[in-house]
Image (cartoon, rainbow, N blue to C red):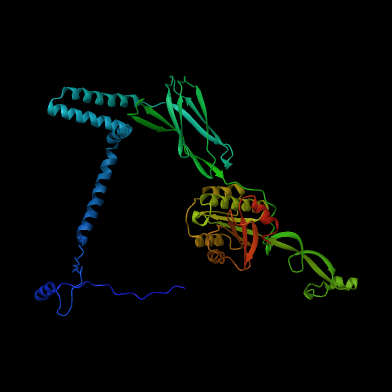
Amino acid sequence: MRVRLPRLPALRRPVPLETRRGDERRGTVPRGRTAPVGDTRTITLPRVQVPSALTDTGARILVLTSERIRPIAGRTRPVWHPVVEVLRWVSALGWTVLGVGVLAWWLTATYAWTELAAVAVTCVVLVAACVLLAVGRARVEIVADVDPARVTVGDPATGRIAVTNVARTPLLPLLVELPVGRTAARFTLPALAAGRTHEELFVVPTHRRGVVAVGPATTVHGDPLGVVRRVVEWTERTELVVHPRTTALESLGAGLLRDLEGEVTPDLSMSDLAFHALREYQPGDDRRYIHWRSSAKHGRLLVRQFLDTRRSHLSVTVDTDPGVYAEGLDGVELGIECAASLAVRSILDEQDTTVVCHGESASRTTVPLTLDALARAEVGAHDLHTAVGTAAGLAPDASVAVLVTGVDRPFIQVQRTLDQFEPEVVKVALVVDAEVPVGVRRLGPIVVLHVRELLDLRRVLFAGALA
């Protein structure tokens, strides 16, 4: 129990009598009161405001200047654009060498240093020679592809790049760069005769879920020193989608609701649309379903029996905040893998499926597209209530709503977010934690599943946790 102590007044140090009397004579301290140490007068300066006329005038000048310069720049583009492109070829090292040359030239002209004149000439000639080496365009045809375009985490993925010399003259050795994710593959092509093709293979990293960008393939013209670097793009950017790992699950078969346009099941029912057969009346049967004509013919009461027509729509939302998982980023990845396994099993069962994961969503689509959405999802803090609300909006007819989250997410937040679904929806909280024992428990209307690893998902669902 916390006890709030009374707030004590600030202690004041007495002022010497001589100082106090002097202050009273000057009128700075009222008589009968002592001036506390450290008290100063505060002066509030008025905020300087720029007249709106000046700001409006400046804005008009910028607009008029841009409107007048843009046509002139468009007409003179053939003159200045080639110069700008050539200037872009010079690297940071090249500008440094050129700056040293200019500085040496100025020192030579000012102080008549003969040695610096040689340095200036060397720097300028070096930059000019490197620019001449980058002039010209190689006539090649480059094809870069990755096979397959979709893989699972850990599966091998290789790419191929083929360079063909389409010129009539031989091609000198050339440097080709191909960005692959956060790295770049560099190939030094040998001299190619006219019409010859050179192929290179490269490996694409697939150790993490996500989208690996491949390309565009570029050729680099310049000098060996890197003073001038001219880059030409030849291909478009392609993507390799790395899907999360999944585990094989048994048929879910849970959370089924009767629906007028649902699928017919082998379960017998006394109130539905798909007529199955007639059977003898039993106490408690609804007399509205008595078939009177057949009953009169056979001399006993017969009632209609139906087959249930049901639908099932699984909605899965993933909490991607690493702060609520005990394992951090690894916990988020495990949660995404669990969500992917549930979604794949649901789609294979021919059920409607909706997945929402950090801004990415997939609803009523195929397995590859659903896994693509999970692969593109980013990891980070987000508004969980909004994410579940998005899932509820995409799946208003959901029969099972699953929220994959970490052990540090307060249960009251889980309950409030899942309450956005209808009351008859089966609500499940799939909690990922490496320390809590694997199992199933029910907290009010919510079924809580605890898993430590991906294979535990099969164990908790085997007992019919979603039923």
When the figure is inspected, residue 54 is found, relative to residue 82, above or below; the finding is below
The C terminus appears in which quarter of the rendering? bottom right
Q: Splitting the image into 4 quarters, where does residue 459 fall?
A: bottom right
Along the line of sight, which residue is nearer the eye, 439 or 49?
Answer: 439
Q: Is residue 135 visible?
A: no
Q: How many marks?
A: 0
Image position of 13 (left or right of 237): left
Residue drawn at 74 percent across, 59 percent down: 265
Residue 246 location, x and y as percent?
Answer: 62, 48
Along the line of sight, which residue is nearer the eye, 430 or 97?
Answer: 430
Residue drawn at 20 percent across, 31 percent down: 103
Image position of 350 (left or right of 284): left
Residue drawn at 74 percent across, 69 percent down: 271
When the figure is inspected, residue 363 is found, relative to residue 220, above or below; the finding is below
Along the line of sight, which residue is nearer the eye, 299 or 209?
Answer: 209
Residue drawn at 55 percent across, 43 percent down: 242
When the figure is inspected, residue 204 is found, relative to residue 374, above or below; the finding is above
Residue 263 location, x and y as percent?
Answer: 70, 59
Farthest residue toward the right?
Answer: 299
When the figure is inspected, residue 188 is found, relative to residue 156, above or below; the finding is above
Residue 211 location, x and y as percent?
Answer: 51, 44
Residue 149 location, x and y as percent?
Answer: 56, 40
Farthest residue toward the left?
Answer: 25
